[in-house]
């Protein structure tokens, strides 16, 4: 099974499932964002033009109010020219948007002016050209006012021209007074300042034009009042609107316009289309970055989840493989067992016969005292014995029924075995110690299997103590795990460290031919495992510890 391919497929599927809806959502949001930016720009420009129209109107209203109040004062003062002059001079100095004041009589002749407005200058101006009336005042169009001439009579300092406007209000007529109108010349650049406050971002600007498109205020990017103009047509009479046009600089702009009531003036608020498009592009770029980040996070998540899934599948797959292997192994062992028992049975008789006849031949030869033939025959006898011992062991193993529903008295079997063994041990100078826990439960095993396991371990222990020693057998009940523990310990030479791992292998033996087959521990271990138990070993040689010896522990479940 290719787990790497599974992982890649899982990642792809996961990314597809999560990124496709995310991408379509992103696309929808971006297009909505674009519309929103456009709408916001339009409504913002509309708002700006409206708001500035109000500002211009407020500016004009303030001037009209000033003039109305001043006209009333003139009546009250019943003009003593000196007082009037002081009053108007003060007003001019206090409010810088006033260039000066003057008064006209009934025949529209100039009868008074503040110091800075000379007759010469005023006579040139179209103050009789009243064009508009608003809030009881009359206005001229905006005209070019030569600032340098202010100081008339002296040498001309500097000829700067500025946009200006005249406002006049009527003076209440009394017998003593020969004035009909009070007028003010207003510096219209103050409207520039007013509008300039609304310039926005990099290219947004607000300015005032008249109904022919001529600039009445200076613009942010250098259009001059009364000199420059934009190509625009207000003939449709619309008081406000929004359009995309090429402006005085040749730039494509989105522009909102709003008429200032009564006056033929329009407040224009615009912004370069390029800047708006840029904003949209930036939105796209931002969306792209966020999209990439999201994709990265999703990828990380997909990698994490797919790794977990693949690991689970892998573990399950390996577990199943293991199970399959064990089943095959069991089947193999079963058929091997069958084969071995058959083979053992078939071989046992000829081997026994061969042994018998070799022994007879050896006895008959004894008389002729042929040493060499004697030695050869002894070897044959040893080998045949060894062969038949192997066969006996295998036969025993295959014959054991190992029914695990049987119960055997632990202490009884141990005691019986030790009783049989004791004389043999005494002969070999081995003292036997048994420490059996009383009232111990039965083991869950048939008597012959349990006895076979125990016999093998005791035989090994005795064989290990060729020069005598101590053989200890203990039994214990491990209540917590419901097991019986039988310990067979000897004070023999111990097992070398490199051999410990091999002693349970079939046919591993350190004994000379004829003495050991190397099947004892293998068979005992297999039997114990089949009963649900285990055999463990602890051993120390002279090199490892002060006292050598080996302890085998059998653990079997209680019945
Ligand atoms: N108590 C022990 N002390 C030292 N070595 C041991 C002990 N028990 C087992 N061994 C070592 O483990 C080897 C394998 O033991 P096992 O019982 O399987 O076979 P064997 O005793 O050699 O032959 P068989 O049991 O057929 O007579 C032994 O040859 C021996 O080297
Ligand atoms: Mg043995």
Image (spheres, rainbow, N blue to C red):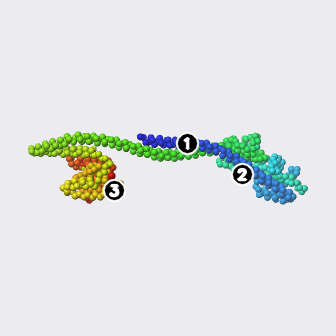
Q: Residue at x 71, y 47 (%)?
A: 49
* Residue matched to label 2: 193
Q: Earlier in the sequence, mark 1 or mark 2?
A: 1
Between the C-alphas of marks 2 and 3, the distance is 101 Å
Look at discs 1 and 2 and give the one toward the viewer: 1
Q: Nearer the viewer, residue 250 or 258?
A: 258
Q: Which residue is most to the left?
A: 368
* Residue matched to label 3: 478
Position of 491 relative to 141 (above/below) = below
Q: Residue 540 location in percent, x, y?
A: 27, 56
Q: Residue at x 15, y 42 (%)?
A: 357
Between the C-alphas of marks 1 and 3, the distance is 63 Å
Q: Is residue 4 in view? A: yes
Q: Based on the displayed image, in which of its 4 quarters is residue 372 positioned?
A: top left
Q: Which part of the image, by quadrant, shows the N terminus?
A: top left
Q: Nearer the viewer, residue 97 or 236?
A: 236
Q: Are marks 1 and 3 in contact (CB under 8 Å)?
A: no
Determine whether the residue tagged by mark 3 lies in a helix, strand or loop: strand
Determine whether the residue tagged by mark 2 lies in a helix, strand or loop: helix
Look at discs 2 and 3 and give the one toward the viewer: 3
* Residue matched to label 1: 21
Q: Is residue 491 in view? A: no
């Amino acid at each position: 099974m290719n787990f790497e391919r599974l992982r890649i497929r899982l990642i792809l599927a996961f990314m597809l499932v999560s990124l496709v809806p995310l991408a379509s959502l992103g696309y929808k949001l971006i297009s909505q964002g674009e519309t929103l930016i456009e709408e916001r720009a339009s409504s913002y420009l509309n708002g700006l033009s409206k708001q500035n129209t109000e500002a211009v109107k407020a500016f004009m209203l303030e001037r009209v109010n000033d003039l109305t109040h001043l006209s009333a004062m003139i009546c009250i003062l019943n003009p003593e020219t000196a007082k009037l002059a002081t009053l108007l001079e003060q007003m001019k100095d206090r409010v810088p948007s006033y260039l000066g004041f003057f008064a006209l009589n009934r025949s529209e002749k100039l009868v008074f002016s503040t110091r800075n407005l000379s007759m010469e200058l005023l006579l040139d101006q179209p103050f009789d050209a009243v064009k508009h009336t608003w809030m009881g005042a009359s206005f001229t169009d905006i005209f070019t006012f030569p600032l340098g001439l202010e100081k008339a009579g002296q040498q001309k300092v500097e000829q700067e021209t500025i946009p200006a406007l005249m406002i006049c209000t009527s003076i209440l007529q009394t017998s003593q007074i020969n004035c009909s109108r009070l007028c003010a010349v207003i510096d219209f650049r103050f409207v520039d300042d007013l509008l300039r406050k609304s310039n926005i971002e990099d290219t947004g600007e607000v300015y005032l034009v008249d109904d022919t498109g001529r600039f009445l205020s200076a613009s942010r990017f250098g259009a001059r009042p009364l000199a420059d103009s934009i190509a625009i047509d207000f003939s449709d009479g619309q008081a406000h609107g929004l359009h995309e046009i090429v402006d005085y600089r040749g730039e494509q702009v989105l522009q909102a316009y709003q008429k200032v009531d009564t006056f033929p003036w329009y407040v224009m608020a615009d912004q370069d289309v390029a800047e708006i498009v840029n904003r949209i592009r930036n939105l796209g770029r931002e969306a792209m970055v966020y999209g990439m980040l999201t994709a990265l996070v999703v990828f990380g998540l997909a990698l994490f989840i797919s790794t977990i899934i693949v690991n689970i599948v892998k573990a399950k797959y390996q577990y199943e493989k293991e199970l399959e292997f064990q089943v095959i192994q069991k089947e193999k062992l079963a058929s091997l067992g069958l084969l071995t028992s058959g083979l053992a049975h078939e071989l046992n008789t000829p081997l026994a016969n061969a042994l018998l006849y070799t022994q007879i031949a050896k006895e008959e030869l004894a008389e002729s005292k042929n040493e060499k033939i004697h030695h050869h025959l002894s070897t044959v006898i040893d080998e045949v014995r060894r062969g038949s011992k192997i066969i006996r062991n295998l036969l025993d193993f295959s014959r054991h029924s190992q029914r695990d529903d049987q119960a055997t008295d632990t202490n009884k079997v141990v005691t019986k075995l030790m009783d049989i063994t004791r004389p043999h041990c005494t002969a070999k100078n081995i003292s036997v110690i048994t420490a059996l826990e009383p009232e111990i439960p039965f083991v869950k095993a048939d008597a012959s299997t349990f006895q076979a396991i125990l016999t093998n371990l005791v035989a090994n222990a005795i064989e290990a103590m060729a020069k005598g020693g101590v053989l200890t057998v203990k039994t214990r009940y491990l209540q917590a795990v419901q097991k019986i523990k039988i310990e067979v310990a000897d004070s023999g030479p111990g097992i070398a460290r490199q051999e410990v791992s091999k002693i349970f292998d079939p046919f591993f033996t350190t004994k000379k031919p004829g003495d050991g087959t190397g099947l004892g521990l293998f068979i005992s271990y297999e039997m114990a495992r089949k009963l649900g138990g285990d055999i463990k070993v602890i051993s120390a040689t002279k090199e490892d510890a002060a006292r050598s010896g080996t302890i085998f522990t059998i653990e079997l479940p209680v019945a």
